[in-house]
Amino acid sequence: MSITLSLQDWWSLFVHFTSLSLLAVGGAMTTAPDIYRTLVDEKQWLTPAQFSASIALGQAAPGPNVLFIALIGWTVGLNAGGGLAAGWPAVWLALWGVLVVMVGVILPSSTLTFVATQWAQRNRELRAIRAFKAGMAPIVIALLLATGWLLTSAHNDFAKDVPLWGLTALVTLLVWKTRVHLLLLLAAGAILGALGWV
């Protein structure tokens, strides 16, 4: 995929991730539906497959949850450079994309978190602080459910995707009822996917 981004487009990307940073209650993953809406549906800077691959790779890799944001920035930059076949200029644009989105998503939320945490620690016994913490839990759960729904929407042909849905149900039960390590389940899913079984 090849796209053309102007300086204004890069600024728009930065501002979008800056605003999302302040809405990332419960982690960066909760912003995935809005990132999809903007970068895939509206601007068409990413394909649905590139978006899903960025999330899958970011979540499978060891490290913080926010890695998928870096991969999204990388892919937008790579698309702006004409893909890997375009050589080093495309790689430099991909690195620029990582920098733009990561600074955009980390700077505002880190600053706000630092200031708010200092204030909340000093005032932790206030009823409003306790109510705020209790009220945020359902919002975070709803945002995570929206992200899960978005990621499964590509697999809406139940008859065709029976093995995938069966595996999803099995893994859900295993996570809920056992102490099987999640990395083992991820590895099993990767192997089944590589073999073409799901």
Image: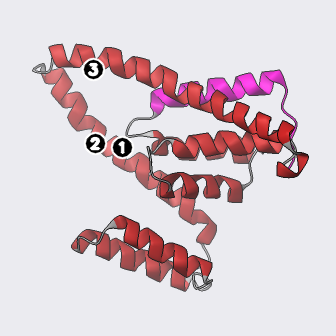
The numbered mark at residue 137 is 2
Q: Amino acid at mark 3?
A: Thr
x, y percent for residue 141: 35, 49
Rendered position, 176 above or below 105: below
Neighbor class of circle 2 (other Cα within 10 Å; few <14, some 14-19, many 20+) is few
The amino acid sitting under disc 1 is: Val
Which residue was labeled with disc 3?
117
User: Residue at coordinates 16% horizontally, 28% vertically from top-left?
Assistant: 130
Residue 114: give x, y in percent of width and height.
Answer: 34, 18
Marks 2 and 3 in Cβ contact (< 8 Å): no
Residue range of the region highlighted in magenta in the rendering: 1-23
When asked about the image quadrant of residue 121, the answer is top left
Name the secondary structure under disc 3.
helix
Determine the residue positioned at 53% across, 78% down.
191
Evaluate if marks 1 and 3 touch, with contact meaning CB atoms under 8 Å apart: no
CB atoms of marks 1 and 2 within 8 Å? yes
- Given the current orientation, which residue lies at the most extreme left position? 125
SS under mark 1: helix
